[in-house]
Amino acid sequence: MNRFVRWIDDRIDIAGVKRGLLDRKMPGGLTWWHTLGSATLTVFLVQVVTGIALAMYYSPSPDHAYDSIRYLEKAVISGATLRGIHHWGASAMVILVLAHMIRVFSMGAYKYPREINWVLGVFLLFIVLGFSFTGYLLPWDQKAYWATQVGTNIAGTTPVVGPMLVKLLRGGGQLGAATLERFFALHVLLLPMMLVVVVMLHLALVIRQGIAPRTAVLETPDAPPRTTDAAYPEYYETRYAKSKGAGVPFWPNIIYKDVLVGVGVVAILVILARVTGAGLESPADPSDTLYVPRPEWYFLPLFQLLKLVPGSWESAVAVGLPSAIVLVLLLLPFFDRKSIRSLSHRPVAIVSMTLVLAGSGLLIGSAVREEPANVVVPESSRPLSSIERSGRVLFQRQQCSSCHFIAGQKAIVKKSDTPDAPDLTSVGLKHSTAWMHSFIEDPIRFHSDSKMPAFGPPTLTHEEIEEITRYLTTLRGPNGATAKPDFKDTFPEPLKPKEIKP
Ligand code: HEC
């Protein structure tokens, strides 16, 4: 073993790597708050591992996405835990990145010489939010579908480029198969690559520049007042070297804290995954316009704010506010050049941080409080198949519901000139699929005085009528699960040859 280590060492100098990474001195007085960055990295690694495992079961198409997740949850050993960890890991990433940023902000660690690393950190925050936005859609359940519908709509309110942006995000005008494929590709290919590159740069800079020392180290009476002063770099160098000289080695004095926090965070994720899991609602249903969309909690402040502002302000808030936040965060180290670092001497920083945190907290709180429960209408004992669901979409699009009533659907205000049409709540018990198909095609053939318009080609194709009738077949009234159909179908006489027009 020793010979092997020596052989490697001769060639790539492991001892040097150890000296550079593990034995390097860190400034003294590092707190537990300093572990937030490494905890974020730990969760990211957890997301990579669980994400790869999830991708082995997942199928990114509207026909299979939901079923593949349900299969994972129900049939794969530890599948639900796996998905739960990935689900909670996503929230943990956001919380940890934000907490890490707050730590860096309040210790003034974004100031000279760490401006570049702050900017890289801001990029990381937005990549993490991108992960969350794209990942939310993948289960293709109601929550996923409608939150993404809202999210892409918000992007659409951007002046000038809005419509193009929506098309780009959705891969077309409507949210559908193209959107799902697109989000999947971003989530598993583009965003991970971007994140890895930026994390590497971020870490390389941390190692190269060393971790920021306690604020007091850089706040001696002889400190130049601004970091732009010509004397500041030299002042910084001397003070930093001194604090490092009195400091402790990374291994083992510092790293044990990182490991402890990392293990703790992973343990919490596993517990959350086992206790509450990730949740899965009913499959995405584009025709269910009664569904109340809910975004992930960290998008709630913006979502809630949008409800409070008047309509004409919506676009300004939806797009302007996030853009302003990005700009302020990116430019922060370049306009704040006072050399003072401790939070207690930075009143503007205290006030703005308190305002942002308290405001977001209040908005999240009020959003959670007024969140209405989504009523689930029991239509039949099993979830609708994709054909039946397309049928339901057609039923609404063809205005069938302007004449017909189905229990559980939004009450339609009837116009006075629409004829009285039968209630279709339990039509699946009254008529066979075949009968309904022929009837919808041409009602006059059945009742010469029928008030129902014919929907046969060219209005609807045979496939579309079939989809509608399959949907109608599932409508079996309140006792649908047990009721027995009792078909009373009478078909008209077949047309005599002379009646068929050439
Ligand atoms: C203009 C109003 C109107 C529209 C729109 C309409 N219907 Fe009808 N529908 C009627 C009337 C009136 C009847 C009863 C007439 C009859 O029996 O000939 C009827 C009967 C039916 C029946 C037979 C019900 C039974 O219990 O006998 C079915 C099934 C049906 N409609 C399905 C549909 C579908 C599907 C659509 C949409 C593609 C649709 N209807 C659109 C007015 C309408």
Image (tube, rainbow, N blue to C red):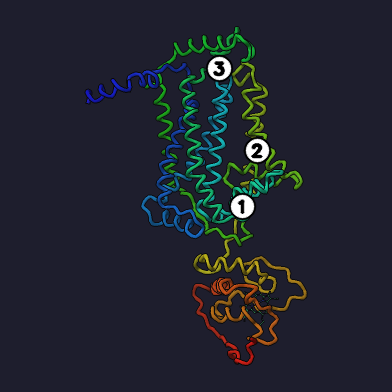
The residue to which callout 2 is attached is 322
Left of 6 or right of it: where is 287? right
Which residue is pictured at 54% across the width and 83% down the height? 487
Q: Amino acid at mark 2?
A: Pro
CB within 8 Å, label 3 to label 2: no
Mark 3 sits near ligand 1, with its Cβ under 8 Å away: no
Residue at coordinates 41% horizontally, 52% vertically from top-left?
Answer: 57
- Residue bearing mark 1: 149
Quarter of the picture holding the C terminus: bottom right
CA–CA distance between discs 3 and 2?
Answer: 30 Å
Q: How many marks?
A: 3
- Give the distance between the C-alpha atoms of the residues marked 2 and 1, in whole angstroms: 18 Å
Which circle's residue, 3 or 2, is located before the other in the chain?
A: 3
Q: Mark 3: give few (<14), some (14-19) or many (20+) Cα within 10 Å.
A: some
Q: Is residue 138 left or right of residue 399?
A: left
Identify whether 237 is placed above or below 71.
above
Q: Nearer the viewer, mark 3 or mark 2?
A: 2
> Given the image, on which type of amino acid does mark 3 rest?
Thr
Residue 500, quarter of picture:
bottom right
Percent x, y for residue 410?
66, 65
Q: Which of pointers 3 and 1 indicates the residue nearer the eye?
A: 1
Residue type at the position of mark 1:
Gln
Mark seen at residue 339: none
Q: Nearer the viewer, residue 159 or 240?
A: 159
Q: Is residue 476 visible?
A: no
The picture places residue 356, in percent across and down from the top left corner, at 65, 33
The residue singled out by tag 3 in the image is 215
Q: Position of residue 140 (x, y in %)?
A: 52, 55
Q: Residue furthest top?
A: 222
